[in-house]
Image: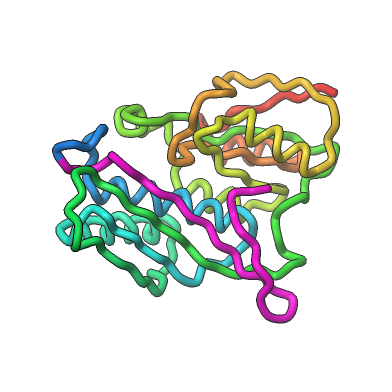
Amino acid sequence: MRDVLFLPATGDSEMVIATDCSGGIGEKANDILFVADNVVAYFAMRVAMMELLSVGATPSAVILSNFTGEKSWQAYMSGIQKVYEELGMNPLPLVGSTETNMMLQQSALGLTVLGTVLKNKKRIKKTPKNAAFAVIGVPLAGEKVLTEQALVAPLSLFKKCLDTPGVFEIVPVGSKGIFYEFQLMLTMNGFDRYNVDCSLPLNESSGPATCFLISYNRTFEQELQALCGRHFHKINIEY
């Protein structure tokens, strides 16, 4: 299944929960990777929001679990705010908690986004057999996320792809890589045997969803290539 949880809600709708976490990345002396706290929160929020939006859900609230300490709260909030700005949406209601009893030696946080979706509007299992596929962005992880930011698929572009007619499904790519997510997409849509070819490394980690998969109607390919520019990487599939 996709990296979201669907729970029964009222009538024809379902609750949707998406989450992401980070540990050992931040501004503390013992962190494995030194990154500004607002950037850490931005990417965690980016992942959770992309997961939620990609299945057709409307976000409604955010939960912030801050294990780093009180001094990091405002920076984390700043990173979350940047996600709202890039998606062109208003801030969501937020509840959170900060660990103040124990002073951890490394940074850690968790971000969870809640939302709802109508059952008949869920964007899963929507890819037909004659669909085309592409990766938007490049898989990056660790320090490369910061040093090669120009290769990261922008959130604004992700939103445009969501709203583009002809796009069937969108799947954010995480640490298991492009091939894992692509294989999962095809299996969920009933595709059987296939060979995959792409110019990008298929098994490298995409860290905080620096790229995402799309399935689309072939007649929209030129429009999508123009929209995504250098971020567009076609996937060729043979049966």
Query: Which is more toward the observer, 23 or 230?
Result: 23
* Way the structure is coloured: rainbow
Q: Quadrant of residue 142?
A: top left
SS majority, magenta: strand
On screen, 38 above or below 77?
A: above
Q: Is residue 3 magenta?
A: yes
Residue 71 in picture, x, y percent from top left? 15, 58
The residue positioned 34% from the left and 50% from the top of the image is 42
Q: Is residue 86 magenta?
A: no
Residue at the bottom extreme?
11
Image quadrant containing the C terminus? top right
Magenta-tinted stretch: 1-28
Residue 73 in picture, x, y percent from top left? 22, 61
User: Total marks drawn?
Assistant: 0
Residue 229 in picture, x, y percent from top left? 52, 33
Image position of 239 (left or right of 76): right
Query: Which is more toward the observer, 155 or 43?
Result: 43
The residue positioned 85% from the left and 31% from the top of the image is 192
On screen, 238 above or below 56?
A: above
Q: Quadrant of residue 185?
A: top right
Image position of 38 (left or right of 91): left
Query: Which is more toward the observer, 103 or 174?
Result: 103
Q: Quadrant of residue 27?
A: top left
Residue 35 in picture, x, y percent from top left? 24, 39
On screen, 191 above or below 238?
A: below
The residue positioned 65% from the left and 67% from the top of the image is 7
